[in-house]
Every structure is written in C-alpha cells, then in structure tokens.
Image: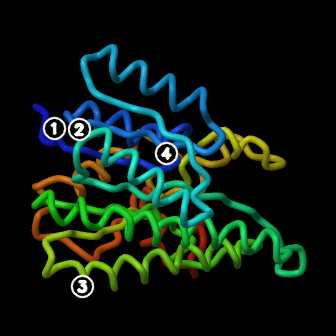
Amino acid sequence: MEPLAGRATLVTGAGIGIGEAIARELARQGARVALHYAGSSAGAHAAMAEITAAGGEAVALQGDLRFVEECERVVSEAVETFGGLDILVNNAGVTRAGTIEETSEILYDEMFDLNMKGYFFCARAALPALEASGHGSIVNITSIHGGAGFPNHAAYAATKGAVIGFTRSLAIELAPRGVRVNAIGPGVIEVPRYFDMPGYTTDFGHTLIPLGRVGLPRDIAPAVAFLAGDGAGFITGQTLYVDGGTNARMGLWWETRSE
C-alpha cells in the first residue's frame, strides 16, 4: 500500500538521522521526496539514490536554512521539481548543550535561527503550494525538551517549546485554508552524536525510557507519515510525543525496593 502515492514532499535536514529516516519512509509510502541537507551531502545523496533505484522519485537540495532567502530558494526548487508541494516536514535543526553561562550569543542565535526561524520561513514559502494542493500538511519536529526541563539545554529547549507554540497557532491560522499543521516530539532517539557524550552507551540509554529501550530514527518516521497523510485528516494543531513514555512519566518518581 502507498497511502502517500504521488504526494510531493520536502523534508528538511534529511541527510542524516531522523530526517533521513523520514524521507525514506515517506518515499516507501509513495511520496515524491525532496531531501534537503546543509552539510550531510553523502547521506542525502545515498538516500536519494536508493529511493530512485527502488522506483521512487527523489531529489537532493542543499541550503542553509538559517537564512530566509535560503528557505525560499530550497522550497522553490522543491516546488519546481515536482510541480507543487503537498507535504512539508520541518526537521532541520541543531542541538547545543551547555549551562546558561556557557551559552554564547553565537550559539543562541545558531539554534534559534535554524530550529525556529528556518521552520517559520520554510512554512511561509511553502504555503501557496500547500494551499493549492488541496490536502496540504506541515509536520514540525520538536522534542521532549519542548515539554519538560533538563539541565544544560535552556536555549535548545526554548527553541523546541517555540516550535510547539508555532504549530498550534499556525494550525488555527491555516485551518480555513485547508492546510493542517502538527508536530512530532521525539524522545531519546539514538543517533551517532549520542556516542560523543561522555559515558553514554546504548544499555544506559535503555534504562532511561519507560518502555525499556531507546528510540531509533525509524521509530519517528511512521508517525510523521501518519500525520502527513489523509488518515490524520481531522487532526491539526497537535504535538504527538514519540518517546517510549518519557514525557508521560511524572518527574517525582522513585524506584520501589523490596525490604
């Protein structure tokens, strides 16, 4: 079955990790996919080649989405390639951990310029095509950091909380125009950068999650496909956490030990 057959899609940040998995899954469900990347050229082009080899339609587009003109250019190239646009997945982002004292203006601006401004202006640029499609859908990738606190992530969490507010407000604004807007909040999704953290192992990651395992990029992709497709046609303005139960767990918990 190909529930997204023929849908023209742009996935930002699709050269690695969650974005790459989303692009592959949307293509598997029949979508034509523009894979945006900033620096991960090899990943984006490898995914594009595999999609086309399997009979799908894909193109790789490079751009620095911290800048409005780049957002507009990447969206324009996707629209021109496919003759329109049905789905926009705003995923491109950057994580920078550090205390508030360690977070410089440069790091702060880097996160907000990509994680929020990029989403906003990609959505604005895509809107005419999404509205014309008749079933336009925007899916924004936020994070569990947008809904709960964690040390040394104040600026990053602020960007992801902003994405949730952006999603809600834009959904109401665009509902009369037939464009749905939703968000996915990934939890601990194991990507290569996790192993740069001192002491991190997969086994340790498993202990943090109520379901008993860390997530993988492929855990996020089907949820994005669902929200983008017609099966979610009456859903807009929502944030779906895909996190193994992390966001649902009360922060004040303790391990029960037998005497």
Q: Can residue 39 be spotted in the picture? A: yes
Q: Quadrant of residue 195?
A: top right
The answer to whether the residue labelled 4 contacts the one labelled 3, judged by CB atoms less than 8 Å apart, is: no
Which label was assigned to residue 6? 1
Whole-angstrom CA distance, mark 1 to mark 3, is: 27 Å
Please tell me which of labels 2 and 1 falls first in the chain. 1
Q: Can residue 216 be spotted in the picture? A: no
> What is the crowding at mark 3: few (fewer than 14 residues within 10 Å), some, or many (at least 20)?
some
Q: Amino acid at mark 1?
A: Gly
Q: Quadrant of the C terminus?
A: bottom right
* Residue receiving disc 2: 31
Residue at x 57% of width, y 48% of height: 63
Whole-angstrom CA distance, mark 2 to mark 3, is: 26 Å
Whole-angstrom CA distance, mark 4 to mark 3, is: 27 Å
Image coordinates for residue 71, horizontal then vertical, percent: 50, 59
The answer to whether the residue labelled 2 contacts the one labelled 1, judged by CB atoms less than 8 Å apart, is: yes
Q: Is residue 180 above or below residue 6?
A: below
Please tell me which of labels 4 and 2 falls first in the chain. 4
Please tell me which of labels 2 and 3 falls first in the chain. 2
Which label was assigned to residue 224? none
Q: Amino acid at mark 4?
A: Ile
* Residue receiving disc 3: 172
Which residue is nearer to you in this view: 71 or 164?
71
Q: Amino acid at mark 2?
A: Ala
Which label was assigned to residue 18? 4
